[in-house]
Image: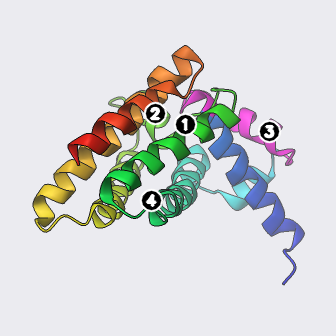
Amino acid sequence: MATSKGEATRERMIEAGIERMRAAGLAGAGINDIVAASGAPKGSVYHFFPGGKRQIVVEALGVHAQRAQAFVAAAMDGAATPAARVRALFAAFAARLERSHCRRSCPLGTVSLDLDDDAPDEIAATIAAAFEQWIDTIAAQLALPDRRRARSLAGLVLTAIAGAYVRGRAARSGRAFTEAGRWLAQLV
């Protein structure tokens, strides 16, 4: 089914929002930045997103969260053991970071670092809900008999992924991912 011109413009704006947040967080994803990156007319912002920047951010984070959850599941799916799944997950993230020349992180992570007292609660709630879904996905792949322990370990894995993005961008290398993956696989 063909996408209408309006739907295509809206999708370009969502994609531009995701990419701007991956590169520069919430501060780098202003309306003018998103409009310029998407090539959309500025007037279309409030046509498609009457809630303005808050709405674009929430929707873009939601789209990315679903994609990332699928990425996590796919990265872990093919490996035979929980340890191999962890190594595969971190290897996939290392490759992803390096494909971006170490210039793009997870937009949920970059945006969460920009949240202050003035940030809409809806943005923080969107990020928190996505992290919980990712923890559930990772925990299911770990296949530990104790669900509480599996979720706790999955939370540690997610925390290591976030930290590896920070280190990887600074060092311009996926090495932080591969190191973390190796150690966490031993823990599993």
* Residue drawn at x 72%, y 45% as measured from the top left: 16
Local packing at callout 2 (Cα closer than 10 Å; few below 14, some 14-19, many 20+) is many
> Are the two marked residues, 2 and 1, in contact with CB atoms closer than 8 angstroms?
yes
Cα distance in 3D space between marks 2 and 1: 7 Å
Report x, y in % for residue 105.
55, 34
Neighbours of disc 3 within 10 Å: few (<14), some (14-19), many (20+): some
Residue type (three-letter) at the residue carrying disc 3: Ala
Q: Check whether the beta carbons of the residues at disc 4 and disc 2 lie within 8 A of each other.
A: no
Q: Name the residue under label 1.
A: 94
Assess disc 4: are there few (<14), some (14-19) or many (≥20) residues with their C-alpha within 10 Å of its C-alpha.
many
The spot of residue 87 in percent (x, y) is 41, 46
Q: Are marks 1 and 3 in contact (CB under 8 Å)?
A: no
Residue type at the position of mark 1: Ala
Which residue is denoted by mark 4 in the rendering? 76
Mark 1 residue crowding within 10 angstroms, few (<14) / some (14–19) / many (20+): many
Give, as a single range, the part of the protein colored magenta.
23-41
Q: Nearer the viewer, residue 37 or 137?
A: 137
Kindly identify the amino acid type of the residue bearing the numbered disc 4. Answer: Met
Q: Distance between the residues labelled 1 and 3?
A: 26 Å
Does the residue at mark 4 contact the one at mark 1 (Cβ under 8 Å)? no
